[in-house]
Amino acid sequence: MVNNDSGELNYSSFDVAAQRSAALENDIKVNPHKHRVLTGDRPTGNLHIGHYFGSLQNRVRLQNLGVETFVLIADYQVLTDRDVYKDISKYVSELAIDYLACGLDPMKHNTHIFPHSHIPELNQLTIPFLSMVSNAELSRNPTIKEEITASGQNIINAGMYTYPVHQAADILFSKSDIVPVGKDQLPHIEMTRTIAKRFNKKFKTNVFRMPVGLLSEVPMILGLDGSQKMSKSRNNTVMIKSTADETSKLIKSAKTDSERHISYDPINRPEVANLLRLASLCTGQSPESIAEEIGDHGAGRLKQVTADALNSYFHDIRQRRSELEKDRGFVASMLRKGIDEARAVAIETLSEVRKAMNMEIMS
Ligand code: TRP
């Protein structure tokens, strides 16, 4: 995704985004302290193992490399396509528990977990940012178009079209340069870069850093139906918080095929390959060699191996999770700490923005 200085925002160059991502990945290992990470999720429920292997594990990796990490809970963004306000505070707390259980650690590391609704100075950045993009650019965003179709609603609120601008505020307030995301978020990163660039140019400043979407290399994790991405709305998930028994039952119910000999063949045997990949992610052993060991013992053995691998991998995480569930006071204190730390950064950024925009009170 490129956009030249003079021109319109261009949503469509995946290769350019992938190159930027690879260059950044190399530098993170050498200079972790030069970088800052910001990532986020909408609080719409608990996280599943697809989220874990697709993004959480990578966030913990970056944190442990020593990179300052902002983990934003996008509670306002939930309003764009659903009506769940009654459950939001519960979901925020559940999400925080999943994060903490998986190893994001605000006590030990420079990590801040916070809901964006609690950072007024972040939200305020949305107002000048809205004037940095055109209506046409907002309505061309391919991810927004897909979400509108998926929502099935016939009245689309303005929050839906404008949340990428709000998301730019989520990212830019923190002066983060690394935004670990899936492919679907790249249009929003491109919008964020465009806003940063236009703002800096218009107000002759360098307040904003240009963030890069960090695309991690994770195999696609399919749901237990083996045919689609793991996703809560498709009812094909194993949750991080599932018990060992629930996990075994869920894996037993997973779709496989009728061939007894187990082999790793992602093209012709996607369901079997998916279970082998999950077992491989948990054990570090290659999917091919797991398949070889199972050999002629069939899908029953494959499922047992996979469930055992998941249960032993997630054992400690689940244990921590159940302790955290009993200590909501601690979870709330971690969120308050994250809010205070993020706010201090947001106040600083907003003050630089005011100065750049010539909006300070004259004396
Ligand atoms: N839009 C993201 C999603 O739907 C959530 C999100 C909000 C986010 N703000 C962010 C992601 C900032 C990365 C950075 O999953």
Image (spheres, helix red, strand yellow):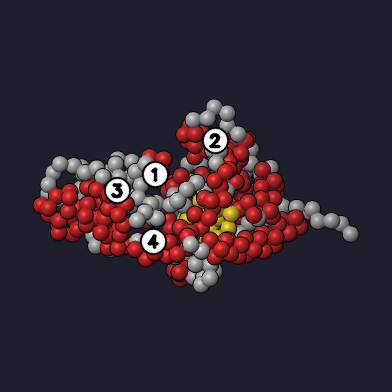
Q: Is 148 in front, or is 201?
A: 148
Disc 2 crowd, CA 10 A, few/some/many (<14, 14-19, 20+): some
Q: Is 362 in front, or is 53?
A: 53
Kind of residue indicated by mark 2 = Arg
Residue at 45% across / 69% down in the picture? 64
Q: Marks 4 and 2: which is nearer the front?
A: 4
> Mark 4 sits on what residue?
318
Asked if the beta carbon under badge 2 is closer than 8 A to the nearest atom of ligand 1, the reply is no
Q: From mark 1 to mark 2, how far is it between C-alphas?
A: 26 Å
Q: N-terminal of the two: label 1 or label 3?
A: 1
Image height check: is 293 above or below 250? below
Seen from this angle, which residue lies furthest right?
363
Tag 2's secondary structure?
Answer: helix
> Mark 1 sits on what residue?
231
Tag 1's secondary structure?
Answer: loop
Kind of residue indicated by mark 1 = Ser
Residue at 66% across / 47% down in the picture? 126
Q: From mark 3 to mark 2, how far is it between C-alphas?
A: 40 Å
Q: Marks 4 and 1: which is nearer the front?
A: 4
- Say whether residue 273 is visible: no
Q: Is 304 in front, or is 28?
A: 304
> Mark 3 sits on what residue?
250
Q: Marks 1 and 2: which is nearer the front?
A: 1
Kind of residue indicated by mark 4 = Arg
Kind of residue indicated by mark 3 = Leu
